[in-house]
Amino acid sequence: MLWFREGLYQSLKTLTPQEEFSPSPGLTPGRPAPTAMEDAALGAICPTHALQEQERLVEIDYARCIQCHFCHQRTPGMNWEAGYHWAEMKSPGLPAPFRHSLQVRVIDAGDCGACLNEIHQLASPVYSLHRFGISFTPAPRDADVLMVTGPVTVSIKEALEEAFGAVPEPKRVMAIGTCALSGGIFASSFAVAGPVDQVIPVDIEIPGCPPPPLAILDGCRLIMGVRSKYPIKEG
Amino acid sequence: MNYENWLKNILDRHSAIPVTIERDWIRVTVSPNLLPELVGALTHDWIFAGIVPENDPGIQAVRLLYVFYAQHGPWVGIEVSNHDQSVPTVSALLFAADWQEREMEDLFDVHFEGHPQLGDFVLHDDHWPEGTAPMRRHSWEIHPKATEPQDLSMPRIVEAPGSFVMPVGPVYSGTAESIQFHLETVGEEIVFAHIRPFYKYRAVEKILEGQEPSVALLIAERIDGLTAFAHSLALAQALETLADTPVPPRAKLLRVFWAEFERIRSHIHVLAGILESTGLSVPANLMQALEENLLQVSGVSAGHRYLFGLNKLGGLSRDWSHAEIQTIVHQLGTVVQQSQRISDALAFDNSFLDRLESVGVLNRDLAISHGLVGPVARASGVNRDLRAWQEYAAYDQITFGIPVQSEGDGYARFRQLCQEIDQSYGIIQQIPPLLSPETPMASGVRITETGTAFGYVESPSGAIICGVSVNGQGMIERSRVVTPGLVNWHAFPQAVRHFAFQDFPIILATFGLSVADLDR
């Protein structure tokens, strides 16, 4: 079969700026939102202790939240918010030359496969990360950004440190997923060395279990300094 | 199946062996010296499920259960009654037990007499010296035991002049998971491949200890995110057996629905990986877009793109109207049709066929001796499927055939996946008419008695067997998850032998193996 022709016959699969602006629940699962309520039992509900009550407002530590819906499904339940602008910068983005090109090395530090697959989905025609000049590279020496997923197991720690050392300056480290930020549900395991920032410095955090591809893409654009909150212009 | 005869034979010969009937299995207690004989008698007609540790309530130590099941027959657990932590190896009789024994040795410090390669497996010895045995006690304290310094390099088999070892990993191409391969070669051909797994070991079975069932399900589904529903279903079924609570019929059927949904998505993921490895980027991208399509359907209908949190003890955590179910079936139908269109075209694509046909061959004998599971086993002519052999959930209400290939090469595995997608869609289409409305989606489950039970699920990549024991407060005391990864990775080195380096990523892709599933 002439695959090239077959590809052209297909309708456009890439998300439009409108679809990105108001994402469907399939594109992003959403997450709990701060809720005004008073409930002493709420703290015990969360399996990863992500809820904190302060002056009748229950706030969420997103670095711990695994979006299990336990706090949402009960009555009274927490609010649930849509959207995907979850990335949080801890240090400045990359300088201007990186606005059009970003090489990414992905490191699996004990991932369950979901975060890794969401990163992998970025390369699918639906998200098409290449249109922003972002691409995956197999060599840390060619990379500008290290994407780390998983709770960092004891056995992979050295490999992660080595990979970090091999990335040339200027570089940024992106911790992806709740496990990478706090250990998530694996935090108490003896085989886990700790969240990514206890091993190498983290510049940008993307919470979620797993964060949807749009949230990861948003993080990349934040690092490149091309994030816009509203419909993006292509090119 | 002559499992009754087997039991009778054993009891006739050794009248002193105690046999107890547990909830849903038969416990046979033997002394270690009788173990090889019993296991040897079982290997031909029974399927080895795994070695499951259990707490001995009398002396608070660990004892091992060798678990077997028969086709349409009962489950048997051979309990080894010994407390000096030394058991004769059975891996010479039953090669499938090889990695399981190595795991048990590393985690529980049980010595398997006669096993040729123990130590440095799950716990890498550069971090945890031999004898650490973190799982042995009910405690989080890990006491390293001082041992002699030892050589941690991988064994080498090839001794020809000019031979060398090519290490790959643990961090290698693209978004690949972390695992290390040592490929022994004399040039172009892989003479032998060694695997060094467990870089991602998270000790799931240890953190499950002392957990409440609701949280335990959240942990189980994060063993392998891509087959999360199957993992939580296996654990949920084991716990429901322990609680002796029936699941409502509607929930049972919908569990089958989502399990098959996950199978289709996971198979499309593997197909996309195969296409990517063969360098056909247009069909690979089209296939990947179909996977994304299904992830979005899950996100809309089940609230999570990977079906996390959908399973709940006693049923499912949400319900769908008839119209919603029909919409999902329709969307699935479109995806299945499109994936079929791609795979049909590939059957005539020479550049694709040349890379898969007669590549990565795993014959039926090897598949049986390694106890392979899932589509990989069925592609090598082993007709083994828990959905038909041990009808769990609502599979007894559904008619389906099991596709099997005979060649055992890469192309057979590819065809197997395509045919299973069709089969799964056939199962899903049967479900909506069977659903009775207005029944609860979950029954209240409370575990009050202690005991051990097994949960078993045919996940997209093969059999998941989950052995769980609980204490009187309904908390998990010990657990063991035998994953398809643990079984199928064991056989992977056999499939790459005598193939060239450029075939390696393709063979790896056709196996559709998950490292997270193996490492846990």
Image (cartoon, rainbow, N blue to C red):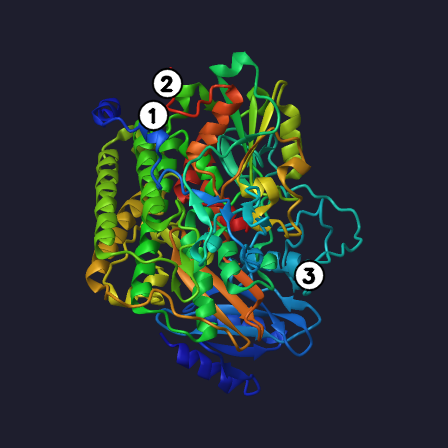
| Residue B187 left/right relative to A25 | right
Instruction: Give the vertical position of B172 relative to B34 (above or below).
Output: above
Q: Are marks 2 and 1 in contact (CB under 8 Å)?
A: yes
Tell me the residue at 55%/45% (across/down). Answer: A59
Q: Distance between the residues labelled 2 and 1?
A: 8 Å
Q: Which amino acid does label 3 sit on?
A: Asp
Quarter of the image for the C terminus of chain A: give it.
top left
Q: Mark 3 points at which residue?
A: B109
Question: In the depicted view, which residue is nearer to us: A204 or B38?
Answer: A204
**Place of residue A99 in the rendered image (x, y in percent of width and height, measured from the top left):** 49, 15
The disc label shown at residue A233, or none = 2
Query: Could you say whether the residue bearing mark 1 is in a helix, strand or loop?
Result: helix
Q: How crowded is mark 2: few (under 14 residues within 10 Å), some or many (20 or more)?
A: few
Name the foreground residue: B8 vs B222: B222
Where residue A150 sits, quadrant-wise, is top right
The chain letter for the residue carrying disc 1 is A
- The numbered mark, 2 or 1, whose residue comes first in the sequence reads 1
Are there few (<14), some (14-19), or many (20+) residues within 10 Å of tag 1?
A: some
Q: Report x, y in % for residue B473.
A: 57, 73
Residue B405 appears in the rendering? yes
Which residue is at a point 65% across and 55% down the rendered structure image? B118
Q: In this view, does B369 lie above or below B510?
A: below
How much space separates mark 3 and mark 2, taking CA atoms? 60 Å
Disc number placed over residue A17 in the picture, else none: 1
Amino acid at the residue labelled 1: Pro
User: Picture quarter containing residue A212?
Assistant: top left
